Amino acid sequence: MAIEDRSMKNQTQVNRRLVIINSISNYGQYAVSILIGIFLQSYMIRSLGKNEYALWPLINTCMGLVALIPISIGSGTARFLAHALGSADWEKAEQITTSSFCALLATAAVYGVSVICLSIYFERLFNIPPGVEGVGPWAMLLMGLSGMVAIPFSTFNGGLRAAQKFVILNILQIVLLTVRMGIIVIAFTLSAPSLIQVGGIYLILELANGVVTFLIARKVVPWNRVRWKSFNWKILWEVNNFSLLVLIIHVAHLLYWRTDNIIINKLLDPTMLTGYSVVVNFVVNCYQLSSLGTAVLKPTAVILHAENNVPRLRRLLYRTNRIIVPVTASILFFLIIYGQELLDVYVGPSYREYAVLFPILAGVCIFSITQGAAASIVPHAFGRLLLVSSVLLIGAVANVILSIFFVVVFKWGLIGVAAGTAVVKVIETTVFWPWYIANLLNIPLLDYLYESYLVPVGNCLPAVLVLLGLRWIGFGKGLIELVSVTAIVGFIESIYLLVWGIDQHDRKAIMLHGRRFWSSFYHRLMVGRLANS
């Protein structure tokens, strides 16, 4: 038992090395998922055609709707487990695991019934492009069942996150994505491509992934186990109360992004959803750069709050923003400036007209990422989500109303759909979040605005100048030149951040790790040469 206690105690550590390792693994997994996602989206559009692929965003929207409750319970579980770890309360951690697992089993059953109903009425709910009748219901059913089998296992995923085992989770995700891509390509090559095949592949692999996650959790986080005698109604009530607020936040995010798919399908040409989804995927994937960086900090922030170490939490937020905002915003500026060229290479010249959406959607995401770290980790750490969830839900409803208004009254088409999202997001990130976070962390508002807006966004200036300069001289046509643009901008921005942009403590840490890596590499190289001679 003493050995087990020491092992579990190591999972409550808050240190720079663990955060750096988790961040690197998150970004590594992100890079792989982006590359696979970019390839698969282009491959599926070209293989399935514009009409059948237009069903895919609708299926994902339905999946998001019925997954709200289990996702929220899973998020609440991870938060309470992290807090229990911060308090070294192993018995409570086991009670949280058991109670949440029971709740997730029940929601999995509700989820399954909802999926079946949506599958039956799929073609009555949406406008189906010609030639693909009968595909949507079966693809929806298989995709929905894949989500259902994964629900109970999210308890063990939450335990690994609470214990800051992001490296393990990221390796599992990379393996899942790689195998899924390979099987989809093989299936499309051996038989006629169909979304039904994709749904079946998702179902089989999600089941396998859930079982593997459960087996790993039993070994790595032994306190993350289900024992029926540990079920506790009081703890389940606490987790569900918090999860209800998380649910409202997820509803808000769904209304912000996924309802656009329904608006386009019902009020505009349904096939336009293919081009719109390509642009949205690029923007959202880039935006996730910031959420990946902050995801590894959630358990750390909860533990710091459990220790009542708010000053360290403030420093964590400032230093995170100085790195994450310039990195993410630089890519978003690339989408704004080179959107047309990117679509030409990715899906062909026929989608070039959709590039007009990049300045709207990518522009609003630049505002959002300045508050992304704060919005993600601070309310979560404090457990203060009531006001946040209410404001986000009101904003999301306003977004839907504005999008419909711009499309129906002003006849703005796709631009109107995107504009509804942009207007609300800009107000939310420039007014609500600065006021709320400054109050929670007891920071003067002007100081917070300086640290969260002026300094991080100012660090993007070298990347913007280089992008504008390269575009002005006409450089960036074709795949090779676009890759060269990203390499040049990335190199110059990295040098600037390392020398001037990031916090001096992070700069010293990076330089120290760099020198250690170089010394180790040089030593091994010399030893190898001596051995060969």
Image (cartoon, grey):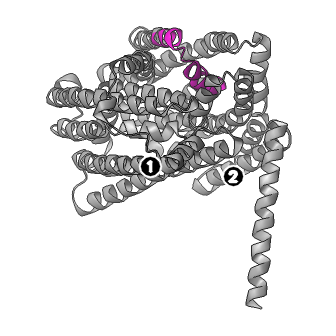
Say which amino acid is labelled 2.
Answer: Ala
Q: Residue at image x 52%, y 8%?
A: 387
Point out the tag, 2 or 1, that comes first from the N-terminus. 1
The answer to whether residue 525 is left or right of residue 371 is right
Residue situated furthest bottom in the rendering:
533
Residue 222: x %, y % from top left: 43, 45
The answer to whether residue 83 is left or right of residue 97 is right
Please rate how many residues cluster around mark 2, counting C-alpha atoms within 10 Å: few if below 14, some from 14 to 19, many from 20: few
Mark pair 2, 1: CA separation: 26 Å
Main secondary structure of the magenta stretch: helix
Q: What number is the disc on residue 384?
A: none
Q: Which residues are magenta?
A: 369-393
Looking at the image, can residue 366 be seen? Answer: no
Q: Residue at image x 24%, y 27%?
A: 106
Quadrant in the rendering for residue 317: top right
Q: Check if residue 258 falls in the magenta segment.
A: no
Query: Which residue is under mark 1?
Result: 173
Query: Which residue is under mark 2?
Result: 487
Say which amino acid is labelled 1.
Answer: Gln
Q: Check if residue 374 falls in the magenta segment.
A: yes
The answer to whether residue 70 is left or right of residue 199 is right
Quadrant in the rendering for residue 145: top left
In this rendered view, identify the residue nearer to me: 421 or 146. Answer: 146
Q: Residue at image x 74%, y 81%?
A: 528
